[in-house]
Image (spheres, grey):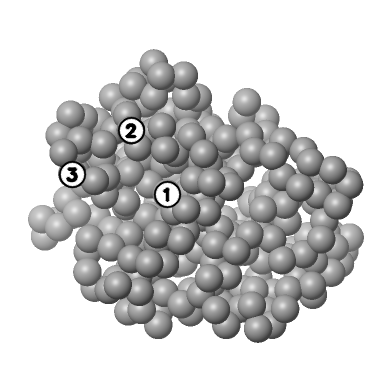
Amino acid sequence: MERVVQLFDQLWQDYTQRLCPSAAQVQDLLTEDEPLLNDHIALRTFNLPKVGLDRLAAPFIAMGYKPCGKYHFEAKKLYAEHFEHPNPDLPKVFISELLVGQFSSLLQQTVRELVDQVPEEVMHNPAFLSGGRYWDLDYATYELLAAESEYAGWLAAHGFGANHFTVSINQLEQFTEVAEVNHLLRHNGFSINESGGEVKGNPEVMLEQSSTIADKVEVGFTDGVYAIPGGFYEFAKRYPTADGELYRGFVEASADKIFESTHSGQD
């Protein structure tokens, strides 16, 4: 248990310092008497052997997590799985990977050259999950990748880390609806991802979600520092299933639009 908490603490530090500095302000707005309950985190990677989904899942599985769901995003050419720990208070982990082979030969070659720079020994230490970028990248290459796949560009620029944490609205006392949280955030100057609607999902699919628009963060490239979309904060409300337990899975149609929180066109 201690190892799991330590790993999430490392991911949180990286997320709030490097990818989504505004998350600390959101925490301040929503925290009540108890610390916020984190519903899940999301990680991104390429489906290449050295850095594929299985490699990112391995540290969590070693700590007791088990695979619980598989998801396909055909338009974005992504595959994802989510993992759960026997302790329901621990966050779920949603890991997606870009299906590199479905893209142009130029993107494939470029991504392979980036991944080839990752030292193999790095991948054997769970700390790589919050280690950022293990390859050199110039801004023009980032733009080239992002033009074909926003996800590829984001991942090439930022490397490994949680692109979002998620507040469980079920735990809150002051708010019971996703829309109420959105209203508070807007009132405090945050932008909400409206792709697919401000609130994604509904009680029928047993999950409602929303998210902020990704922070613009400064990233160092080999030819300078540029401000690009980083991480975002998500909010989730889960509904009980027939057995009375809260639904624990994810909804592909909603997750598809949550990915777009990092799109630069969402400004």
Left-right relation of 80 to 239: right
Where, by quadrant of the figure, is residue 64 drawn?
bottom left
Q: Amino acid at mark 1?
A: Phe
Characterize the local packing of mark 2: few (<14), some (14-19) or many (20 or more) Cα atoms within 10 angstroms.
Answer: few
Q: Earlier in the sequence, mark 3 or mark 2?
A: 2
- Quadrant location, the C terminus: top right
Q: Amino acid at mark 2?
A: Asp
Left-right relation of 75 to 210: right
Residue at 20% x, 35% y is 32
Q: Which mark is residue 165?
A: 1
Q: Which residue is mark 3?
A: 34
Position of residue 83 relative to residue 121, above or below, is above
Say whether marks 3 and 2 touch (CB < 8 Å).
no
Position of residue 141 relative to residue 257, above or below, is below
Inter-mark Cα distance, 2 to 1: 15 Å
Q: Which residue is mark 2?
A: 28
Characterize the local packing of mark 3: few (<14), some (14-19) or many (20 or more) Cα atoms within 10 angstroms.
Answer: few
Q: Earlier in the sequence, mark 2 or mark 1?
A: 2
Q: Could you say whether the residue bearing mark 1 is in a helix, strand or loop?
A: strand
Q: Earlier in the sequence, mark 3 or mark 1?
A: 3
Question: Can you give x and y, in whole percent of width and height, for residue 139 in the image?
Answer: 84, 46
**Looking at this view, is 66 or 137 the one in front?**
137
Question: Can you give x and y, in whole percent of width and height, for residue 192 in the image?
Answer: 47, 27
- Quadrant location, the N terminus: bottom left
